[in-house]
Amino acid sequence: MPWPASADLLAPLAPWFDGVRRELPWRAQDLDAPHADPYAVLVSELMLQQTQVATVVPYFLLWMHRFPTPKALAAADEDSVHKAWEGLGYYRRARFLKAAATVVAAQGWPKNLAGLADLPGLGPYTAAAVGALAFQWPTPALDGNAFRVLARLLLIEDDPRRQAAELREWLVPALRAHGPSRLTQALMELGATACQATPACGRCPLADRCEAHLQARTREIPPVAKRARQHTAELWLLALEAEGRFLLHPPAASGLLAGLWRWPTLDATALPAATGPASALRAWPGWTQVYTHRREAVSPLHLRRDRSFPAPEGLLWVPRAELAALPLGKRDQRLRDLLATPGERPLTAPKPAALIAALTAPGR
Ligand code: SF4
């Protein structure tokens, strides 16, 4: 890899970052010393996976108020942990955070990168970021932003992730020279604010040495990965109420949705809408729920019945008064919020009897 020395090439980044850095509640004042609270770094890094800084800030503050130490989080019950995470999405992160805090509370912080990477939920990137930001270890953390900056700077023409090992090794002297925490954050910040998909090279401290910029090739580097077309599932999302109780799926013990209650869903292509539905139904405008590997066209419905019936397999009746306290994912939380609004009698929707028959069908 005939790349220029990283400590020289990236030298302008450190003073640039000192000038532009934003105050964030998890960010250390002194970027030359180990962080006073490694747990705050761990919480912020897990929250920031897949979530924007502005969204994370209030969640972080509330979280640190409720669970201020690894010990406090380790002792908290699962429901309160999920409740505090509610709205951030990707709930596995909350469970990993609690599991990691449990290890740290019992054994103390790991002493090296391998130990951090062994904590639940910390992949190579998060372990390296916590190593650099919390402990000032020269552990290169390469996220999508950092890969994009380095690909352009070094004119890497194919997917820079293929050279992750070489890039990490190349970056170590720069981390040592300019401070692991400062340089790691500077690289992330540059990728997030200037070197975006369409870069603002005019405000970049590396413009005089960036090969992609100097050769006017920033549009093609790094190459855009082709994404598989995602199938969109069409769903009725159903709040079925009877005698002051709602039907919900209780949380699964494991998997992506562990710890979360869910409204029942019905396949809208198998249960098409009919015209002239009963007045027992309320509806609201639908929306598209986007997940990493899946999209759902969601149509929310509220069906009220006078008489209750035994809960179908896999569902439980939950009193209305307990609904607000249940941890729900983003999609299901949205229907819970809608229930407090008027809604409308839908022009087209399945007949109530068809909804209930589909919900209670054996083996659904
Ligand atoms: S000069 Fe432009 S393309 Fe190069 S690192 Fe800076 S913002 Fe990115």
Image: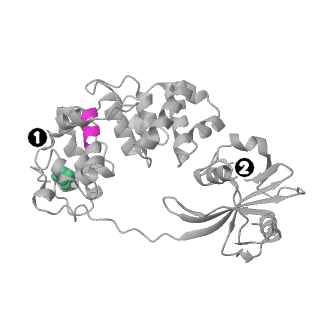
The colour scheme used here is one colour
Going 22% across and 64% down the picture, which residue do you hit? 219
Looking at the image, which is closer to me, 53 or 145?
53
Taking 82 as reference, is 274 left or right? right
Q: Main secondary structure of the magenta part?
A: helix
User: Magenta segment, which residues?
Assistant: 181-187
Q: Amino acid at mark 2?
A: Pro
Quadrant location, the C terminus: bottom right
Estimate the x, y position of residue 190 in percent, counting from the top left: 25, 45
> Residue 22, which numbered label?
none
Q: For the view shown, which residue lies furthest in the right direction?
A: 307
Residue that numbered label 2 is attached to: 250
Residue 1 within the magenta-colored segment of the rendering? no
Quadrant location, the N terminus: bottom left
Taking 219 as reference, is 22 left or right? right
Estimate the x, y position of residue 117 in percent, counting from the top left: 41, 39
* SS class, disc 2: loop
User: In this orientation, does residue 67 appear?
Assistant: no
User: In this orientation, does residue 115 appear?
Assistant: yes
> Ligand 1 within 8 A of label 2's CB?
no
Q: CA distance from mark 1 to mark 2?
A: 56 Å
Estimate the x, y position of residue 361 in percent, counting from the top left: 80, 68
Q: Quadrant of residue 141?
A: top left
Residue that numbered label 1 is attached to: 8
Looking at the image, which is closer to me, 102 or 288?
288
